[in-house]
């Protein structure tokens, strides 16, 4: 075990991937000089042939990685900023995600797409403050949102091994965090939720950057209310079973996610709980989400849009009745 | 333009007798196969045997033929929504193509892709694509992969005059140039992007002029002359193979039919080009007729031999249509298959309710 920072697990993930898979290369903007800190030392270790600084051409390099994947490579794409994934929506969704199916399994697109600084980096304003996963989930893209260094390393190892495109979101608000990480090799399979805290009275499903906030609220409410915190870790595939087991135990549920409310991830998870565990519920399932507006630059406005600990506490108290 | 008639034939006739007769025969046959395939596809489409829209390649046969014959088996192509000719010329199984159009289990994609998505990776056919411009970076990606592997394959990226205005195409040309990718950008300028004339949509005189911005060679050629396409692309491909520098070749060509099979119903009395223009291209610059005339005039192949090829091709395509019609549809509940590499995820939702 060692105490590791989130970002050091990212660097380790890239290093391992390049070392373990001959067919892997990383492509993205300003990665040779590791602008985002995530690709530090990679060029020195693996050379420029494995770490490509792309021009600012998201559609282009995403499409190029797909073409290389069609030819048997296992590329990793790093987006510089969370919303840049929208630029390449066509290549990601119409192409990477659909090609296996359209070709009746003739081709695999083993692509890992990483998104540093997902969510709200703080003061980044509307065009740089998204968690662009709800639309991708709707379109079937495998999606991982690790909230701790431990989860990041274990999930990344699984993501690069996947023979499908996988988006890995690294939420800005947790990227400076640290946790204990085993020295020996381990993996976390996609689709396995983690109970981050055991409790008896209410299940709070928390995603990515909201996990630490929910854990803090849970500590504060203890022992008045005993909160169980479930972190899905992977949004597609989603570990519905662990969520339902928890709700069947606590009989109450709140889902917390920092994406928009309308057609958001929280809405989907809440619907699944209502559908499958309705007779176990003592109260309606509550959603805590962003407000349906762009994220503001000004700190008080940003705070208004993003759900914070107060809102989470209020929702928990509401379902407790 | 009528003096073009002899000119179009004459230009093909020059030096014909010095060329490999077998190659000339293959050129003629391939163009005829594409044309016959498209006529039959059109009939099947009208008869309701093809579920979706199809984009016919009629009139452009010399381009796919000239390009494919200039490529080696291992070379890669990435194609467009108008890809039948490219796929056929690169050697795809004709039965499988026709069955794919019909949505049958025996199709190239087992009925999953249809007209706009045919692939055969074993033949270097990295896919047709229904998104204009989307396959262009895929061709560059295959070239990128070749570069990493140090092999000597070349990729050809087909795209249209309409696609030439897509950002992703420019992004890709730039990357191919800065990274020395062995890719030939092959623009088929058939004069229209749906109803929009290239004159109204493309800045500058020629699409090939854009190559200069990306520090690559670019040229515009007569895409109705199969020999000119073959010679130019062969040289382009071999130079690219040696130097790993991308190039741009623009082929001036023309599509005889509407943009897609349903166009007439949509446009009705709002035509975007006059019949006389179509007739002019058909009468004076048809790639097959003019080539045939040149072959006969140069005494390379006689009418009888060419008629024999025609009859043979017709029978072959008829067989393919029969194969397609007799093949089975896949079962509907097969739909979730191959969505992911493994289907065992706990929440994989095949159910709708
Ligand atoms: C990105 C995108 N925009 C629009 C369309 C609709 N569309 C399909 S084909 C086409 C015209 C393409 O013209 P061109 O590239 O010249 O090819 P051609 O049809 O002439 O072969 C359009 C607009 C599309 N499929 N994709």
Image (tube, grey):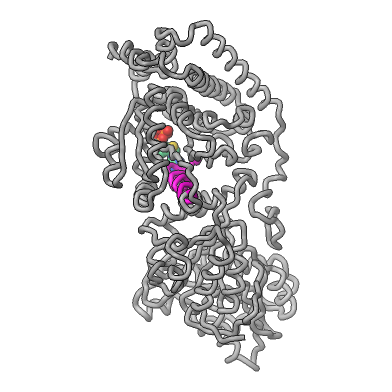
Q: Is residue B140 magenta?
A: yes
Magenta run includes residue A48: no
* Secondary structure, magenta segment, majority class: helix
Residue plotted at (44% across, 12% down): B292
What residue lies at 68% left-to-right and 48% top-to-bottom? B337
Q: To which quarter of the image does residue B166 belong?
A: top left
Q: Where is residue A193? Give x, y as percent.
A: 66, 73
* Magenta-highlighted residues: B129-146
State which quarter of the image contains the C terminus of chain B: bottom right
Image location of residue A163, percent across then percent down: 61, 57
Identify whether B216 is placed above or below B33. Answer: below
Query: Which quarter of the rendered image does ligand 1 occupy?
Result: top left
Judge whether residue B267 can be spotted in this image: yes
B128 and A22: which one is in front?
A22
Quadrant of the rendered image containing residue B52: top right
Looking at the picture, tell me which residue is in the foreground, A279 or A269: A269
Relative to residue B341, is residue B198 drawn left or right? left
Q: From the viewer's perspective, is residue B189 above or below residue B243? A: above
Quarter of the view holding residue A30: bottom left
Which residue is at the far left?
B204
């Amino acid at each position: 075990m060692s105490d590791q920072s989130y970002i050091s697990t990212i660097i380790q993930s890239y290093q391992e991937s390049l070392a373990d898979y001959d067919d892997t290369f990383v492509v993205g903007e300003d990665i040779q000089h590791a602008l985002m800190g995530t690709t530090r030392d990679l060029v020195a270790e693996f050379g420029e042939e494995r770490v490509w600084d792309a021009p600012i051409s998201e559609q282009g390099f995403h499409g190029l990685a797909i073409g290389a994947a069609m030819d048997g490579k296992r590329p990793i794409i790093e987006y510089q900023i969370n919303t840049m994934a929208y630029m390449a929506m066509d290549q990601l969704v119409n192409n990477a995600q659909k090609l296996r199916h359209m070709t009746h399994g003739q081709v695999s697109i083993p692509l890992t797409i990483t998104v540093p600084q997902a969510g709200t980096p703080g003061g980044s304003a509307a065009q740089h403050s998204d968690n662009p996963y709800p639309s991708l989930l709707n379109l079937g893209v495998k999606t991982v949102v690790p909230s701790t260094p431990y989860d990041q390393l274990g999930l990344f190892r699984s993501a690069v091994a996947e023979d499908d495109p996988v988006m890995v979101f690294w939420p800005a608000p947790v990227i400076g965090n640290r946790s204990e990480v085993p020295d020996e090799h381990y993996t976390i399979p996609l689709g396995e939720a983690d109970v981050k805290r055991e409790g008896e009275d209410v299940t709070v499903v928390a995603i990515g950057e909201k996990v630490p906030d929910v854990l803090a609220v849970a500590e504060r409410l203890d022992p008045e209310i005993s909160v169980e915190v479930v972190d899905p870790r992977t949004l597609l595939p989603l570990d519905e079973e662990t969520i339902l087991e928890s709700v069947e135990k606590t009989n109450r549920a709140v889902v917390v996610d920092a994406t928009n409310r309308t057609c958001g991830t929280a809405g989907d998870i809440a619907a699944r709980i209502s559908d499958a565990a309705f007779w176990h519920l003592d109260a309606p399932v509550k959603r805590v989400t962003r407000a349906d507006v762009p994220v503001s630059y000004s700190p008080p406005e940003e705070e208004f849009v993003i759900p914070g600990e107060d809102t989470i506490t209020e929702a928990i108290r509401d379902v407790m009745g | 333009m009528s003096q073009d008639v002899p000119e179009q034939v004459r230009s093909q006739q020059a030096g014909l007798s010095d060329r490999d007769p077998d190659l000339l025969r293959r050129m003629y046959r391939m163009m005829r196969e594409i044309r016959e395939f498209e006529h039959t596809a059109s009939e099947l489409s009208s008869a309701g045997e093809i579920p979706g829209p199809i984009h016919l390649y009629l009139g452009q046969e010399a381009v796919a033929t000239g390009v494919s014959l200039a490529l080696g088996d291992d070379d890669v192509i990435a194609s467009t929504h108008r890809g039948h000719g490219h796929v056929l010329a690169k050697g795809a199984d004709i039965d499988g193509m026709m069955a794919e159009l019909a949505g049958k289990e025996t199709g190239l994609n087992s009925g999953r892709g249809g007209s706009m998505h045919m692939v055969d990776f074993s033949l270097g056919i990295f896919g047709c694509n229904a998104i204009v411009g989307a396959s262009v970076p895929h061709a560059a990606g295959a070239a990128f992969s070749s570069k990493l592997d140090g092999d000597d394959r070349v990729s050809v990226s087909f795209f249209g005059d309409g696609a030439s205005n897509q950002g992703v195409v420019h992004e890709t040309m730039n990357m191919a140039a800065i990274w020395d990718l062995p890719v030939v950008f092959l623009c088929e300028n058939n004069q229209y992007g749906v109803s929009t004339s290239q004159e109204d949509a493309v800045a500058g005189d020629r699409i090939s002029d854009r190559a200069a911005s990306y520090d690559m060679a670019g040229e515009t050629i007569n895409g109705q002359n199969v020999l000119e396409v073959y010679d130019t692309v062969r040289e382009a491909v071999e130079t690219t193979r040696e130097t790993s520098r991308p190039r741009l070749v623009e082929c001036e060509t023309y599509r005889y039919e509407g943009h897609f099979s349903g166009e007439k119903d949509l446009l009705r009395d709002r035509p975007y080009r006059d019949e006389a223009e179509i007739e002019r291209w058909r009468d004076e610059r048809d790639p097959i007729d003019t080539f045939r005339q040149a072959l006969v005039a140069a005494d390379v192949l006689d009418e009888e031999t060419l008629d024999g090829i025609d009859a043979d091709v017709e029978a072959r395509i008829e067989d393919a249509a029969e194969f397609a019609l007799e093949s089975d549809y896949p079962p509907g509940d097969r739909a979730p298959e191959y969505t992911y590499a493994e289907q065992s995820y706990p929440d994989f939702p095949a159910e709708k309710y």
